[in-house]
Amino acid sequence: MKLHWLQHVPFEGLGYIEEWANANGAQLSCTRLFAGETPPGIDSFDLLVVMGGPMGIYDHAEHPWLIAEKEFIRQSIDAGKRVLGICLGAQLMADVLGARVYPGPLKEIGWFPIERSPDAPELIPQKPTVFHWHGDTFDIPQGAIPLATSEPGINQGFIHGNKAIGLQFHMETTPASMEALINNCGHELVEAPYIQSANQIRDGLRHIPSINTAMKNLLDALTH
């Protein structure tokens, strides 16, 4: 299997997904969009993973590569590739599928539970505590199945055509990737209902084994 991933900032990598890929003998390749690299041909990979980043999907002036990236994601979905988008990646997927992406009612940063939607397949546990770091959210694309919601009433994921999955939350988080976000985006940790402090976030380390297991199960389902 050939896994290609899109990276938006140097400090957000694949996290646990890299461990899963190595365990499954996958061939990894990456487009570092922030460095001016361009995505490969559609036929060069089996699974596309679109990672997160602090920018918004409409920040074209500051990040002009977003325009070409969206077209690449659209072509990948249209070609029937398996596509997984995480956080910003899910928002980009929602956008190219015609759904609205906009600032959420509340930022969610830290460890908070989500609940699997009643009609969603069992790709994730019923009510896991997962890691969040986002301000924007999305509507569910037409024809897609809602995957989960969180307590503030925010859409947390969708499944489109059995091969494309968008996750607003993070199950790929590792201790290192969590620290990288705290170090690079810690200015966002202000007092608010669904924003935890750096110490509270670090207290959530105990959740990492369970979310990584959930990510493994989701990736296994998506690729088999």
Image (cartoon, rainbow, N blue to C red):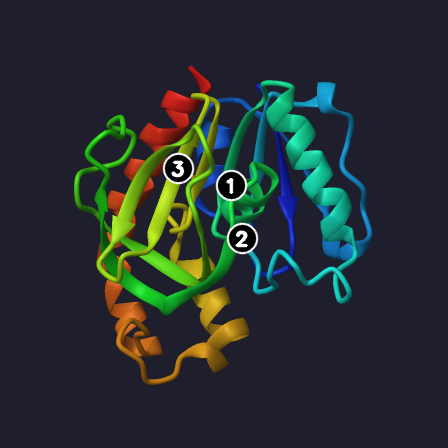
Q: Quadrant of residue 105?
A: bottom left
Q: Identify the element where label 2 is drawn.
A: helix
Spot the residue most to the top: 224
Q: Of callouts 1 and 3, which one flags the residue occurring earlier in the amino acid sequence? A: 1
Q: Which residue is more in the foreground, 200 or 79?
A: 79
Residue 195, given in percent of the width and then of the height, sits at 32, 74
Placement of 183 over or under 6, stated as above or below: below
Q: Which residue is mark 1?
A: 85
Q: Identify the element where label 3 is drawn.
A: strand
In the rendered structure, which amino acid carries the disc numbered 3?
Answer: Phe
Q: Crowding at label 3, few (<14), some or many (≥20) Cα neighbours within 10 Å?
A: many
Q: Crowding at label 1, few (<14), some or many (≥20) Cα neighbours within 10 Å?
A: many
Q: Which residue is more in the foreground, 93 or 144?
A: 144
In the rendered structure, which amino acid carries the disc numbered 2?
Answer: Leu
Q: Crowding at label 2, few (<14), some or many (≥20) Cα neighbours within 10 Å?
A: many
Q: Of callouts 3 and 2, which one flags the residue occurring earlier in the amino acid sequence? A: 2
Q: Which residue is mark 3?
A: 158
CB contact under 8 Å: marks 2 and 1: yes
Placement of 26 over or under 128, stated as above or below: above
Question: Could you give the CA–CA distance between mark 2 and mark 1, rounded to whole angstroms?
Answer: 7 Å
Residue 136, given in percent of the width and then of the height, sits at 47, 61
